[in-house]
Image (tube, rainbow, N blue to C red):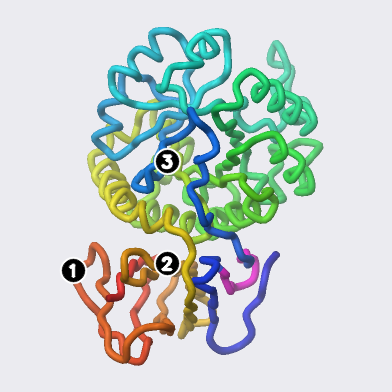
């Protein structure tokens, strides 16, 4: 669903009672109410991800287990995917590094059904895209959704104690993605695919994207997360992928853009992140993130802040409400609010490449309060439940209001 703002301020309203992020946006921007879960979403799987409220999934996609300690030091707490695996050696290396994994349920995986290193199973990647034919003969249609559902049932029959993850392609967010072949412009396929998983993820990389329609429009990340939340059944969990390298482009995301994509994801309802760290330009490098000191430092800082805020992000809903007004109608502000341990938290991001000022009205606050802007070394006075702050292009501000 999309909403075109009328003249004047863009307003975002959402209820702390249900902790729903509701985004009012410029033309093409998603709008909706993706819910934050009221209880730990992994509690029903005895061998799934940790139930500790301080755990928030921060994964890396398809990396060598030999790199696990380096990723651990960067705040990564999960591997997703193992090349031609899992193998015995891969699982042994991950176990030694204390790094859990989501992997395919092959013969080796089933032999390790009691191994706590494996905390989830996964389908093959992007079955919604056109699939390569044998002997380089081009591409055929996507994998039918009913096949994904059948595979899911088989995996669950073999092991119901772990969740099954499905990662979908950019067609989740962009209907015009031609990589879907004969199923291009068929978003109705996605609710059917999602029936074949417990955790659903997707990837779109706006900074490095080759299409002018998508390139630079970070809000496509929000659209995909919101759509998955809307298409999912109660109890299903939404994750998404984050770009942090050139991939196959001449452009590379700036740390500021990566941070924006992360918080755009979280504010719109994502409950897990997967960093895509491969790069094909100027040369192939399967672990380009650890080899990029500037980006590695930025991602490490982002992950540290997410870990610190994990209990807040995982917290149940509480009563209350907030309203956000953007002074620039072409730059909407998306936000999410929670309460945890007393303070109120408001997480906000500017959703366009432009300047604006946000006015936040938070209920159930004393007449005079103070908002600490986390990680920025500044505070903002809150009078009668209202605070104001400036936003640059895709700026993120995280407020703790005491």
Number of numbered discs visible in the structure rendering: 3
Residue 366 seen in render: yes
Kindly state the secondary structure of the residue where label 2 is placed: strand
**Which residue appears at 39% of the width and 82% of the height?**
357
- Magenta-drawn stretch, dominant element (helix, strand or loop): loop
Q: How far across and down, in percent of the image, does residue 380 sit? A: 26, 81
Sequence-first tag of 2 and 1: 2
| CA separation in Å, label 3 and label 2 | 19 Å
**Which residue appears at 48% of the width and 12% of the height?**
112
> What numbered label is drawn on residue 338?
2
Q: In which quarter of the image is the N terminus?
A: bottom right
Task: Give the vertical position of 287 relative to 19 (above or below).
Answer: above
| CA separation in Å, label 2 and label 1 | 21 Å
Sequence-first tag of 3 and 2: 3
Magenta span contains residue 329: no
Judge by depth and name the residue closer to the eye, 176 or 127: 127
Q: How far across and down, in percent of the image, does residue 126 sit? A: 63, 33
Residue 281 seen in render: no
Determine crowd level at label 2: few under 14, some 14-19, many 20+ residues with C-alpha closer than 10 A.
many
For mark 1, what is the residue? 377
Whether pointer 3 and pointer 2 mark residues with C-beta atoms closer than 8 Å, the reply is no
Task: Give the vertical position of 330 relative to 337 (above or below).
Answer: below
Determine crowd level at label 1: few under 14, some 14-19, many 20+ residues with C-alpha closer than 10 A.
few
């Amino acid at each position: 669903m999309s909403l075109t703002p009328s003249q004047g301020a863009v307003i975002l309203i959402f209820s702390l009672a249900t902790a729903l992020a509701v985004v009012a946006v410029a033309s093409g921007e998603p709008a909706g109410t993706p819910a934050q879960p009221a209880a730990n979403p992994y509690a029903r799987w005895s061998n799934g991800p940790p139930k500790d409220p301080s755990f928030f999934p921060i994964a890396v996609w398809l990396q060598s287990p030999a790199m696990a300690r380096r990723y651990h030091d960067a705040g990564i707490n999960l591997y997703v995917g193992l090349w031609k695996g899992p193998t015995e050696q891969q699982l042994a290396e991950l176990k030694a590094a204390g790094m859990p994994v989501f992997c395919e349920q092959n013969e080796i995986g089933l032999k390790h059904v009691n191994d706590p290193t494996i905390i989830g199973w996964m389908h093959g990647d992007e079955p919604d895209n056109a699939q390569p034919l044998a002997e380089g003969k081009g591409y055929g249609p996507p994998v039918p959704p009913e096949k994904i559902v059948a595979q899911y049932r088989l995996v669950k029959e073999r092991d119901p104690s772990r969740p099954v993850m499905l990662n979908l392609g950019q067609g989740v967010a962009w209907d015009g993605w031609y990589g879907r072949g004969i199923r291009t412009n068929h978003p109705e396929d996605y609710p059917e695919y999602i029936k074949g998983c417990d955790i659903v993820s997707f990837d779109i990389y706006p900074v490095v994207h080759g299409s002018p329609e998508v390139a630079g429009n970070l809000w496509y990340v929000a659209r995909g997360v919101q759509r998955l939340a809307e298409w999912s059944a109660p109890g299903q969990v939404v994750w998404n992928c984050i770009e942090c390298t050139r991939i196959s482009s001449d452009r590379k995301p700036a740390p500021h853009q990566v941070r924006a994509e992360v918080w755009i994801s979280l504010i719109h309802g994502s409950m897990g992140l997967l960093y895509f760290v491969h790069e094909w330009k100027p040369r192939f490098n399967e672990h380009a993130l650890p080899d990029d000191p500037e980006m590695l430092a930025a991602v490490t800082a982002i992950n540290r802040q997410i870990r610190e805020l994990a209990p807040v992000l995982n917290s149940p809903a509480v009563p209350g409400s907030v309203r956000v007004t953007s002074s620039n109608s072409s730059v909407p502000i998306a936000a999410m609010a929670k309460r945890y341990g007393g303070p109120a938290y408001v997480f906000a991001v500017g959703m366009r490449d432009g300047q604006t000022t946000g006015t936040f009205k938070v209920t159930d606050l004393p007449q005079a309060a103070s908002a600490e802007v986390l990680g920025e070394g500044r505070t903002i006075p809150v009078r009668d439940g209202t605070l104001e702050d400036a936003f640059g292009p895709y700026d993120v501000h995280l407020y703790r209001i005491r």
